Image (spheres, rainbow, N blue to C red):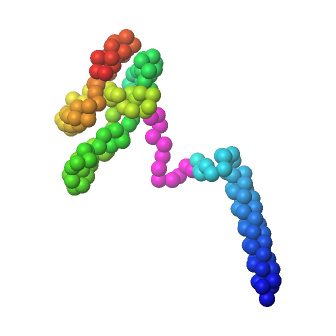
Amino acid sequence: MLLINIVSAVLAAVSGFYVFRRMHAFFNRLESRIQARSGATAPPGWNVRPAAKPGGIYQDRGALLTPAESHFYSTLAPVAQRLGFRVHVKVRVGDLLQPRDDLDEATRRRLFAKIAQKHVDFVLVDQQMRPVAAVELNDRSHERPDRKARDLLLGRVFQEAGIPLVGVLTAQTYNDQEIAALIRSVL
């Protein structure tokens, strides 16, 4: 009887392993066929979705930066690199700052809601990806009352967090030495 139980257990294990190998092979073939149809050549474990066909409810917004922001970035990025920093664009304030941990949860949620949907144009980060300064490019839109209120709020929260927030007026040209001096002055 013991021999029959051992043989049964071995056969169950072997057949289970056989079924597992067959299923594993099936799913690998299925994944290969899906990738072949989509034209994707992603490494295993990557989730690649081919670009949607036009006609959906979402569309591409175009360039990430406005022409004025792009023009300023072309001066800021090399200056920041020479100073040992990297530049990130359109960073959500809620990814940079948060209310203090010692506040009660309701207060933290209320304060976070004030900054969660706002962003700054540029953030300079050090080699450990810690923010060292934020930069706002100020055009005429910053003269509107709603933008002035937003700018005051951001100025206050960045000051409280100890991260300099630098406002730069839009211009036809930017002097890289002036930009470097401005960055050095706030660090």
Q: Number of marks in the image?
A: 0
Residue in view at x 45 percent, y 40 percent: 61
Answer left or right for 172 relative to 155. Answer: right
Nearer to us in this view, 181 or 101? 101
Q: Quadrant of residue 161?
A: top left
Q: Is residue 98 visible?
A: yes
Residue in view at x 39 percent, y 13 percent: 176
Nearer to us in this view, 87 or 85? 85
Q: Residue furthest front?
A: 2
Percent x, y for residue 5?
Answer: 76, 83
Q: Is residue 66 visible?
A: no
Q: Is residue 67 above or below residue 30?
A: above
- The rendered magenta stretch, by its main secondary structure, is classed as loop
Percent x, y for residue 171?
Answer: 33, 18
Q: Which residues are magenta?
A: 52-65
Residue 61 highlighted magenta (yes or no) = yes
Q: Residue furthest bottom?
A: 1
Answer left or right for 26 relative to 156. Answer: right
Percent x, y for residue 174?
Answer: 37, 15
Residue 42 highlighted magenta (yes or no) = no
Residue in view at x 75 percent, y 78 percent: 9
Q: Which quadrant does the C terminus fall into? A: top left
Answer left or right for 121 relative to 106. Answer: right
Q: Which quadrant does the N terminus fall into? A: bottom right
Percent x, y for residue 131?
Answer: 37, 31
Residue in view at x 21 percent, y 29 percent: 143
Nearer to us in this view, 162 or 49? 162
